[in-house]
Image (cartoon, coloured by chain):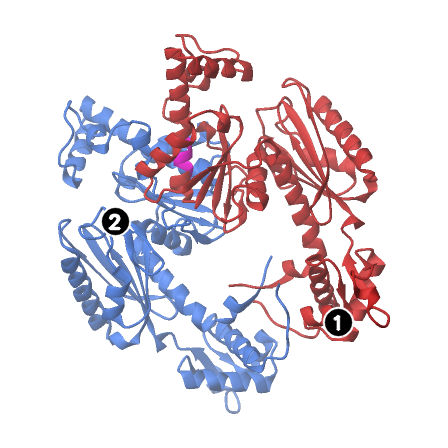
Chain colours: A blue, B red
C-alpha cells in the first residue's frame, strides 16, 4: 500500500525538480514568475531548483522573447530545457535493411541514415554495418558519441529483457545473440532491444496512425506476420516476450506454407524471396488467373492471422504495416472479414510511418528510458485513475 | 504527475484507517500495541482510528487470547476485523445452470446453491430462478438481504461496463439485456457483471490452478470456446469487452461448424446439444471409427483456437476449463501442438475449480469492489514499481 510521507526532503526536492523540468520541456522558455504560476511552487523553491538544473546542464538561460527588450526596465530572466544536453538513437536492424534516427532529449529527429544489408550477412558483419552507419549519422549531425544517453533497437525475434535474442530465425546467427550486450560495448550507454513489431506499435502510437488510441495491434505484415500490441497505452510483451508472434498459427491448421500459398503451379516457390513475391503480385495485376488465386490465398491467410489477434486482444484499432501493407486490396478484405466474424470489429488503418516505423519506435523506447530517469518521480509515486 | 502533499487531514485519516483495517484483516486479533508496531502509526492515532472503525461496525473488540487471562493483571484490549459486517455474492448465470456462492467481507464462503435451468428459458424466467436461488442461500445461511455489500455475476457474452449484455447468443433474450440494472433492482447494492470466461480466469488465479502466475489464459472449452486472460494479474477485457472471444476464428478459415465437425455422417448433427455431443464421445470411446475421427477433428480445432490465444498473448500458463476439459485426451495434444508451434510454449493445466469457477470468480469481483471501498486509498495514491 502506498503511504504518503511529507518528511523526506530529498524526495521532495526530486519531485520539485521533475515538476519544473517538465514545465520547461513543455514550453519554449519560462521566467521564474511563469514557473511559480505553472508549478504552484514558491519563488524561492523554483529559484533553487532551476539553479540545480542549470548545474546539471539540463536547463540553460534563454534570450528574452521578442518585444521584451523594447519594454521599460531589464526583462525577467528566462530559462529553457536544454534538449541538446544529451542525444538518443533509434536503430532498426532488419534482414535487408538497417536504419538509425538521432534526436536530442526532446525526441525531435536531427539526423537519420539507412543502409541495405544482405539477408545472408553474419551477425558480426551486420553489427559492423550498424556501427559504421551510426558513426556516419553522428558525424553528419556533429554529435559526439559520448553525448548518447540511450539507444533503442528494434529487430525481428523474441527478445529477452536484457537484450538477448532468444529466438530470431529471420537473421543469420540471431538466435542466442547477446545483442544488447554487444551494442552496449559500442555505445557505452543503456541499450534497449525490442522486437521490431513491438517497436513499430510504439511508433504508430507516438506519431503515426494510432495517436488517438491506447489499445492497438500493429501487424508487421510480410510472408510470416508478426504483431505488437499496446494495452492501455503500454506495450504488451507477453510473459516471455513472444506476444503477437502469430506467424506460426497457419501451421496448426494444417494449412499450407507461404511457399505453397503463393505458388501458381503444383510446386512450391523456392526460394520465396521478395523478388519472387513481387513477381507473383505483378502477374496478378496483369490478369494472370493462377497468380490472382495465389494472392487471394495469401490475403486470406493474413486476414485469418489478424482475426486471431483481434479476437484474442479486442483492440480499438489495427494498424497494418510491413511490405504486405503495400499490396493493393489488403485493407478492404481485412475490414470486411473482421466485421463479419469479430463480435466487436476494430478500426483498421494502414501504417503512417511506413519503413520508418521500427527505428521511430526504437527512438521512442530510448526516450522513455531517459524520461524515466529525468522524471524519476513518476516511477516512484503516482496518482492512479 | 503525482504530487505528494502532506496537508490534507481527511486524506491522511483515510489512509491511516485503511492501514489499520488492512492489518486487522490479515490477523486474528491485535492489541493497540500490536497495531502501533505493525502500522508504524502513533498510539493516539491508532486509538482514534480503531474507535472510528468500531463506529462503522467494521471492527469489534475481541476476547483475550488463550493464556492471556491467566497472566497477572488485566489483558490488553484486542480488536478484530468484523468479516460478518457485510456479505458478498458470486453468481453464475449459464445456459443450463445457475449457481451462487455467499461469503463475508473476508471472502470465505459460508453458503452455496445451484439449480439447473432450461436452455430455452426466457430472461425473465432465468432471472426469477436466480432470485429464488439466492433467497434460499441467504435464508439457509441466516444472512439478511440488506447485509449484501456487492454482487458479482458471471455470464456468457460480451458485457459492457454498466452490466448490459452487448452480445450473448448462448442464452435466449440475452443480447441487449440490461442485466446489471435488473439485478441491482433486486439486490439494492452494487452488481458487477462479467463475461463467464473472464470470471473463471479471475477465480483460477485466486484459488485454483493459476495461483502462482499473473499472466494466464483461461479457456472455457465447449462447442465454441471462449477465453479470459489476466495480464500482470489484472483482467484484460479488451477495448470493447470482447477479448478472448476466440470461437469465431474457425469461421474465417472456412473450416466447418461444430455441427459438421462432430458429425459421423455426411449430415450435420442437429440439434448439437450436450446429449448429442456426449453420444459422439461415448461412441468414440467404444471404438467407433467415425466418432473417433469426429472427436479428433474437434480437438484439433480446440488446439488451433488455443494456439491463436497463446501466440497473441504469450501467457505463462493456460488453464483449460469448461466441459471439454473433461474429455479424455484433450491435454496431451494441446501440450504437444503448443510445444511444436509456439515460439515460447506456455504451461498447460486443467481447471482446479471445475464448475465452481465462474461463481467463484464472480465472488472475487464482488470482493475486489468492496475492498476498493474499504481500502480506498489504494485506488487514490499508490507506489508503483
Q: Secondary structure at mark 1?
A: helix
Where's residue A319, x and y in %? 38, 44
Residue B308 shown in magenta: yes
Segment tinted magenta in the rendering = B304-309
Q: Could you say whether the residue bearing mark 2 is in a helix, strand or loop?
A: loop
Q: Are marks 2 and 1 on the same chain?
A: no
Q: Quadrant of residue B124?
A: top right
Does the image show residue B128? yes
Magenta stretch: dominant SS?
Answer: helix
- Whether residues under marks 2 and 1 lie with C-beta atoms below 8 angstroms apart, the answer is no
Between the C-alphas of marks 2 and 1, the distance is 59 Å
Q: Chain of mark 2?
A: A
Figure check: A91 above or below A309 = below
Q: What residue lies at 83% left-to-right and 68% top-to-bottom?
A: B75
Q: Which residue in the structure is indicated by mark 1?
A: B33
Query: Could you say which quadrant of the image residue A141 lies in?
Result: bottom left
Callout 1 crowding tier (Cα within 10 Å): few <14, some 14–19, many ≥20: some
Nearest the eye: B352 or A34: B352
Amino acid at each position: 500500500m502506498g503511504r504518503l510521507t511529507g518528511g523526506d526532503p530529498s524526495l521532495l526536492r526530486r519531485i520539485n525538480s521533475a515538476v519544473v523540468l517538465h514545465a520547461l520541456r513543455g514550453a519554449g522558455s519560462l521566467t521564474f514568475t511563469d514557473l511559480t504560476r505553472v508549478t504552484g511552487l514558491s519563488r524561492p523553491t523554483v529559484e533553487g531548483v532551476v539553479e540545480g538544473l542549470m548545474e546539471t546542464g539540463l536547463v540553460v538561460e534563454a534570450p528574452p522573447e521578442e518585444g521584451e527588450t523594447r519594454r521599460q526596465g531589464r526583462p525577467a530572466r528566462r530559462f529553457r530545457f536544454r534538449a541538446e544536453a544529451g542525444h538518443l538513437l533509434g536503430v532498426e536492424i532488419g534482414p535487408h535493411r538497417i536504419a538509425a534516427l538521432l534526436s536530442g532529449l526532446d525526441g525531435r529527429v536531427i539526423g537519420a541514415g539507412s543502409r541495405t544489408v544482405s539477408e545472408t550477412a553474419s551477425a558480426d558483419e551486420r553489427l559492423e554495418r550498424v556501427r559504421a552507419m551510426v558513426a556516419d549519422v553522428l558525424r553528419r549531425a556533429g554529435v559526439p558519441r559520448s553525448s548518447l544517453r540511450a539507444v533503442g533497437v528494434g529487430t525481428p525475434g523474441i527478445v529477452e529483457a536484457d537484450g538477448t535474442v532468444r529466438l530470431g530465425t529471420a537473421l543469420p546467427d540471431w538466435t542466442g545473440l547477446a545483442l544488447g550486450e554487444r551494442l552496449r560495448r559500442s555505445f557505452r550507454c543503456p541499450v534497449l532491444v525490442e522486437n521490431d513489431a513491438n517497436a513499430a506499435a510504439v511508433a504508430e502510437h507516438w506519431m503515426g496512425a494510432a495517436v488517438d488510441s491506447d489499445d492497438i495491434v500493429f501487424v508487421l505484415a510480410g510472408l510470416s506476420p508478426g504483431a505488437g500490441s499496446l494495452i492501455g497505452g503500454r506495450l504488451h510483451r507477453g510473459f516471455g516476450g513472444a506476444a503477437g508472434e502469430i506467424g506460426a498459427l497457419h501451421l496448426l491448421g494444417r494449412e499450407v506454407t507461404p511457399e505453397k500459398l503463393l505458388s501458381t503451379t503444383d510446386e512450391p516457390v523456392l526460394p520465396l524471396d521478395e523478388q519472387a513475391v513481387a513477381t507473383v503480385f505483378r502477374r496478378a495485376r496483369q490478369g494472370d488467373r493462377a497468380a490472382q488465386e495465389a494472392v487471394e490465398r495469401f490475403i486470406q491467410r493474413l486476414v485469418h492471422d489478424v482475426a486471431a489477434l483481434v479476437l484474442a486482444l479486442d483492440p480499438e484499432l489495427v494498424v497494418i504495416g510491413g511490405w504486405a501493407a503495400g499490396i493493393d486490396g489488403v485493407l478492404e478484405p481485412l475490414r470486411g472479414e473482421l466485421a463479419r466474424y469479430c463480435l466487436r470489429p476494430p478500426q483498421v488503418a494502414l501504417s503512417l510511418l511506413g519503413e520508418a516505423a521500427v527505428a521511430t519506435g526504437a527512438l521512442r523506447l530510448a526516450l522513455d528510458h531517459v524520461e524515466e530517469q529525468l522524471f524519476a518521480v513518476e516511477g516512484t509515486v503516482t496518482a492512479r485513475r
